Image (spheres, rainbow, N blue to C red):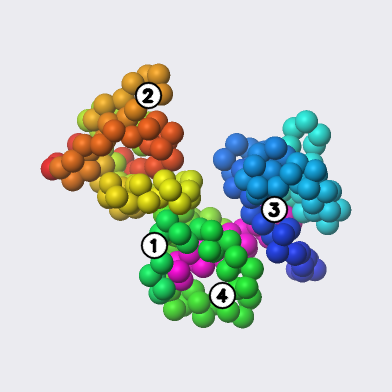
Amino acid sequence: MESKKTTVSSKAEEYLEAIYRLENKTGVAKTMELARQLKVVPGSVTNTIERLERQSLVIHEPYKGVKLTEKGRKLALNILRRHRLAERLLTDVLHVDWSEVHEAACKLEHAITPDIIKPLEKTLGHPKTCPHGNPIPTACGGIIEEKSEPLVNLSPKESGIIVKIIKENAGVLQYLATLGLTPGVCVELERKTSSGGPVTIRVSDTSHALDYKVASIINVKRTDGKMRG
């Protein structure tokens, strides 16, 4: 039997999406991390989390963090679906640079209603990922994701195809684009240190030194041999 539809505000949608992203990354969403990501004061986070908990959308364990309930997860995936389709609309149809679409999609996602999402998806050609390579949830709330791992996991002289950029920071995306590091591109790891220092990679016939943190947000699918220039 289908459960009664839950309606939440745009603000609550932003929280659910942020909780999903943090929970998917670390297993739980810490309130301080939520405040930092949403750029609000911790007290505001606490009040909103309490409201979401009353709606049975999250479970908050003091000193541990926040997790989505199954009901909350379904809502979060629906929001994420709208967000990533909005990013596709902005890049594919309106030709907005991929580094700028995340912030714009955060606003646009709230305006995409159920009667719009199906024709939008059809117009876009039923894309499977956002412009940054992250999977677009299905209408049923499923996630079909290509297997990948952080670029920094590769050993020297190993190569991989870039699958996704997991952190959609505008400045970082602009930087990666200037180096040609976008989904679908083959990259070889040339050198790395064990201390988390710079990582040297090669794309096409050019070598670049990347900060370890930047390299760690690039996920790749291993190839059989090293990349050829």
First in sequence, mark 3 or 2: give its number: 3
Q: Depth check: 186 or 144 in front?
A: 186
- Residue of label 1: 97
Residue type at the position of mark 3: Tyr
Residue 159 lies within the magenta run: no
How far across and down, in percent of the image, does residue 219 sit? Answer: 40, 42
Residue type at the position of mark 1: Asp
Answer yes or no: do the residues labelled 4 and 1 have beta carbons within 8 Å? Answer: no
Q: Separation of disc 3 and disc 4 at Cα?
A: 21 Å
- Residue of label 4: 117
Please tell me whether residue 138 is drawn above or below residue 19 in the rendered image. Answer: below
Please identify the quadrant where the C terminus is shown.
Answer: top left
Tell me what residue is drawn at x 58 percent, y 61 percent: 106
Please tell me whether residue 188 is drawn above or below residue 162 in the rendered image. Answer: above
Q: Separation of disc 3 and disc 2 at Cα?
A: 34 Å
First in sequence, mark 1 or 3: give its number: 3
How far across and down, in percent of the image, does residue 111 sit? Answer: 62, 73
Instruction: Residue at the far top: name it.
Output: 195
**Rendered image: mark on residue 192:** none
Image: magenta residue range: 70-90
How far across and down, in percent of the image, does residue 204 sit? Answer: 18, 45
How far across and down, in percent of the image, does residue 195 sit? Answer: 40, 19
Apparent side of residue 64 relative to residue 189 in the rendered image (left or right): right
Residue 139 in view here: no
In the rendered image, which quarter is residue 100 located in? Answer: bottom left
Please tell me whether residue 161 is drawn above or below residue 208 in the rendered image. Answer: below
